[in-house]
Amino acid sequence: MAAAGLGTAAGQLVGSALDPAAAPLQAVGAAVIDLAPPGLKEWAVSTVGTADKPLLVATVLVVVVLLGAAAGLWAGRTAIAGDLIFAGLGLVGIAAAVSRPTAGPFGFLPSLVAAGVAVAALRWQLRWSSPDITGAPSRAGLDRRLLLTGGLGVLGAIATANLPGIRGSAPTASPIVLPRPRSTAPTFPTGLETTVTGISPLRTPVPDFYRVDTALFVPSLETAGWRLDVTGMVANPFSLTWDELLAMPLIERDITLTCVSNEIGGPYCGSTRWLGVRVADLLERAQPSPGAEQVLSTSVDGFTASTPLPVLRDGRDAMVAVAMDGQPLTREHGFPARLLTPGLYGYVGATKWLTQLKLTTFAADVAYWTARGWAQQAPVKTATRIDVPHGPIAAGATVVAGVAWATHRGVSRVQVQVDDGPWQDARLGPDVGLDYWRQWYLPWDAPSGQHRLSARAYDGSGVPQTAQVQGVLPDGATGYHVIDVQVG
Ligand SMILES: Nc1nc2c(c(=O)[nH]1)N[C@H]1C(S)=C(S)[C@@H](COP(=O)(O)O)O[C@H]1N2
Ligand SMILES: [Mo]
């Protein structure tokens, strides 16, 4: 176990110096994410949420250490067996690192070093712990092993601390000056949160904005050297530096972003003010060829999304965003630039750490989640979330309140049902436009006892909410958010 830990620590150190994504834990963790069946991923997202990444790394580490224990036990009988286990582990790490879409030429090195160090450490331990001529284990061997285990603790700590970006490093060194938008958003109204305690604020604070992605470590890009390539089936391919992108006309828009994996009533929906360059402007300059069907956006970490071209040309404010809530994007949300497509779920229109927009066909290029069975076309479905009450409440005058969204279609009406009573129209909060969620509330004189509250919305054309998520709902389920409340 000590040898496995030492080897891993060495690999992590080489990786952090060379290419963090190639470090053994990151590389294997990322491969597990990409290879995991979609059902497992949904389970992870819904049960452990954003903690899924540290949990995954910890699991990989535990498996490595357990295999180290097996190596130690077998090596006691046949020394070569231990070598073989560590060599096998090293090969897994190397395979994971070099098969990344963004692998560099030295991706194999961290896991190679890890396996080498582990084999050497195991051999060294075996030498000292082999029985002496009387058959008793040598004293020196035990002391050494203790020493080694102690050393492992220290190095293990370094290695774990050395997982840059699992939580995202500090923003870029050079301060970023955001140009003023050419087209500003209307004055932002005051939300219901000033009067309704517990309702989602009309604008989501950036630290509270949900994060969903496949990136085990948050890519740490800098604006210097960053480029956005617009390429593929276009008459005029081009490439923009950060300064060139910012020199284009910027739009400022209030847009709600949500994840298809959000459970009914779940947290994976956020709303804020974005600043960016219209995708339509970029397309206009590139001049897509007649056969182009989609824009395949690529992230620096290899993630891809397919956004249907007609959607990007129908006049909506799809943008390459550079700021949210008045500040440059945080690393977690795609610094320095990301795609944002109002009305589409994140996995088909919101690529973070964006580096390329490629005009292509659906047959020629299959995006990350489409390859894993998710729909190619994914407009956001109408959804409602009850934010309050949350937990038991006292009997008497109170409110039921929350948010509803039908991105790019707007929300025209929200209704609440108490137990089996009539559906009552809730009052709607301020209107921030078709692309933004709507707060709502309904005063409620809550009688003592156990009550069931249901909420549903209608989109801007009056079409009622049906299923919200993933298509598969249990029999009889409506997709409405339903909660049970204990009153009194
Ligand atoms: N590079 C990259 N971009 C990505 C993803 C990803 O896994 N990698 N996930 C997408 C999904 S599924 C969603 S819902 C949104 C979430 O954006 P947020 O984390 O800023 O809220 O990012 C999208 N962009
Ligand atoms: Mo998502």
Image (tube, rainbow, N blue to C red):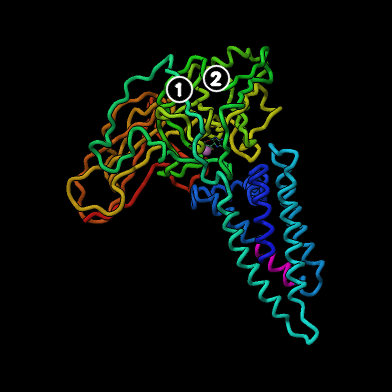
Give the image location of residue 254, x and y in percent: 40, 25
Residue 129 in view (yes/no): yes
Extreme residue toward the front, this view? 140
Q: Is residue 279 above or below residue 214?
A: above
Give the image location of residue 365, x and y in percent: 69, 29
> What residue do we see at 69% from left, 58% from top?
7
Extreme residue toward the left, this view? 396
156 or 42, which lies in front? 156
Residue 368 image label: none
Q: Secondary structure at mark 2?
A: helix
The answer to which of marks 2 and 1 sits earlier in the sequence is 1
Is the distance from the Cβ of mark 1 to the nearest ligand 1 atom less than 8 Å? no
> In the displayed structure, does residue 148 sit left or right of residue 350?
right
Give the image location of residue 228, x and y in percent: 61, 23
The image quadrant of residue 213 is: top right
Give the image location of residue 64, x and y in percent: 66, 60
In magenta, the rendered stretch is: 65-73
Mark 2 lies on residue: 243
Q: Is residue 31 magenta?
A: no
> What residue do we see at 38% from left, 25% from top?
460
Residue 178 image label: 1
Kind of residue sitting beneath label 2: Asp
Q: Quadrant of the N terminus?
A: bottom right
The image quadrant of residue 183 is: top left
275 or 485, which lies in front? 275
